[in-house]
Image (tube, rainbow, N blue to C red):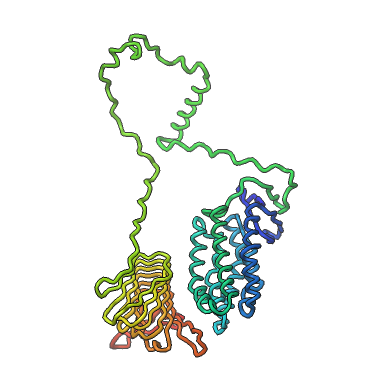
């Protein structure tokens, strides 16, 4: 840990095998207990993951290579925002290289491996995600689950190395979350001691004591009345306190006949209550009411399959379906629903991070008010509607390429069509449009810069 005096504040940086260059001065960081705890992650699940990646070889070994090693071993435990931004630049560059490698190797037989890493590696930027760094890492880990599940499905019965690779990779994020909870629950930790760098950038000898903490803040000015009145009142108060024992000379003497503890009759008399404003209520805000947790539902109600309030359920399966039935999924989070057979329609409403896999739908699949949804068509579907949704990936089958996709008020939509080799080509759905008057009516076309 190293402390740095930056505009009057004592700040701290901690890194692993990293060197800060600030104003052309190089400062070497010393290890701390935080770094030691992080080293345990690097030498444990990270080392196992890298070893298995080299064992798998091919694009997986090239993908991790020096890029991911550098990202994982470069770790900022605490720094000011201005310096933190410059320190994270090489980390951001390495993450971009990892994602670019995945995009340039979509035809790779190990594309699911590359995608799992590419989707979740931004979690290493948690140091800039105060006050909730741990939920951010969990969110990035969940983004990888869609692809790691595909790896497990493809290699579960073929090659145990790939299964171990998935377990090792996911354990990195599990251990990182435990580390953050233990040392940086709400963000980067500020050091209260340590050597202070001089203006030349060189640290003083280790024997120098840490600087004293800053003094208390100056007393606040009296908000009532003018500044001169407040100053006079404070001066009078300090003068009275400086009298010492003589301060009691101005008190009135109370005779025995007026003391209630010596006259029981006085205690029985009603006392007058001084009227005046009520005291201020407690300034502490009331605790928010706990969020209402509704029980999960998965049942057939008449002709409707109701799937509601599912949380983290990855094995939801509806298999006994009929053509006249519909499926309605509502408020499901981090779950996966598989629908077998042929049915009338499917609606996914107000769901987050949900996966939907179905075979045949004769009507429509409606995605509304959702966020981060993945839909995979195994058979046929005539229409998919996407409304008020942010983040929707639609995987079409060879039999569903004629499907109409209707969207409104949505963003980050992508359609993936299958290639002859079994891989998918990802195509973005336009979000920006151009409308012109042709003399008789309005003509709307997708903008060329919409992607």
Q: Is residue 71 left or right of residue 186?
A: right
Instruction: Name which residue lies at 74% across and 46% down.
Output: 206
Nearest to the observer: residue 83 or residue 32: 32
Nearest to the observer: residue 315 or residue 246: 315
x%, y% of residue 431? 41, 78
Instruction: Name which residue lies at 49% across and 84% down.
Output: 425
Does 415 sit above or below residue 219? Answer: below
x%, y% of residue 268? 27, 16
Instruction: Name which residue lies at 62% across and 69% down.
Output: 49
Q: Can you tell which quarter of the image residue 353 is in?
A: bottom left
Q: Is residue 340 left or right of residue 25?
A: left
Q: Can you tell which quarter of the image residue 329 is in?
A: bottom left
Nearest to the observer: residue 354 or residue 56: 56
x%, y% of residue 202? 73, 52
Does 178 sit above or below residue 392? Answer: above
Nearest to the observer: residue 99 or residue 38: 38
x%, y% of residue 333? 40, 66
Which residue extends farthest left?
A: 302
Labels in figure, total: 0
Does 131 sit above or below residue 245? Answer: below
């Amino acid at each position: 840990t190293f402390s740095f005096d930056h505009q009057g504040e004592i700040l701290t940086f901690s890194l692993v095998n990293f060197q800060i260059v600030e104003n052309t001065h190089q400062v070497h960081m010393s290890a701390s207990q935080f770094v030691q705890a992080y080293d345990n992650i690097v030498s444990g699940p990270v080392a196992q993951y890298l070893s298995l990646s080299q064992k798998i070889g091919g694009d997986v070994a090239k993908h991790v290579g020096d890029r991911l090693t550098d990202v994982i071993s470069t770790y900022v435990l605490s720094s000011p925002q201005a310096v933190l931004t410059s320190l994270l630049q090489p980390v951001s560059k390495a993450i971009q290289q990892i994602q670019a490698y995945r995009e340039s190797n979509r035809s790779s037989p190990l594309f699911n491996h590359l995608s799992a890493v590419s989707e979740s590696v931004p979690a290493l930027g948690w140091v800039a995600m105060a006050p909730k760094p741990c939920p951010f890492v969990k969110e990035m880990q969940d983004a990888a689950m869609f692809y790691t599940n595909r790896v497990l499905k493809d290699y579960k019965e073929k090659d145990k190395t790939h299964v171990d690779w998935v377990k090792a990779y996911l354990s990195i994020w599990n251990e990182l979350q435990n580390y953050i909870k233990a040392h940086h629950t709400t963000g980067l930790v500020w050091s209260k001691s340590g050597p202070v760098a001089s203006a030349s950038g060189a640290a003083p000898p280790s024997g120098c004591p840490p600087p004293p903490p800053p003094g208390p803040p100056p007393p606040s000015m009296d908000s009532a009345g003018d500044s001169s009145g407040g100053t006079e009142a404070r001066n009078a108060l300090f003068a009275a306190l400086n009298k010492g024992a003589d301060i009691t000379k101005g008190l009135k003497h109370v005779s025995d006949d007026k003391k209630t503890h010596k006259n029981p009759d006085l205690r029985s008399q009603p006392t007058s209550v001084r009227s005046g404003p009520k005291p201020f209520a407690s300034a502490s805000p009331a605790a928010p009411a706990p969020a209402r947790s509704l029980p999960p539902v998965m049942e057939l109600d008449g002709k409707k399959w109701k799937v509601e309030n599912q949380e983290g359920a990855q094995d939801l399966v509806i298999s006994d379906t009929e053509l006249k039935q519909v499926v309605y999924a509502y408020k499901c989070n981090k779950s996966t629903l598989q629908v077998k057979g042929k049915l009338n329609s499917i609606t996914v409403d107000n769901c987050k991070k949900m996966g939907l896999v179905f075979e045949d739908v004769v009507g429509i699949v409606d995605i509304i008010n959702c966020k981060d949804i993945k839909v995979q068509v195994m058979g046929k579907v005539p229409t998919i509607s996407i409304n008020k949704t942010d983040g929707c990936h639609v995987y079409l089958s060879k039999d569903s390429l004629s499907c109409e996709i209707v969207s409104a008020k949505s963003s980050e939509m992508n359609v993936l069509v299958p290639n002859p080799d079994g891989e998918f080509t990802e195509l973005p759905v336009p979000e920006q449009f151009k409308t012109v008057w042709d003399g008789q009516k309005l003509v709307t076309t997708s903008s060329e810069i919409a992607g």
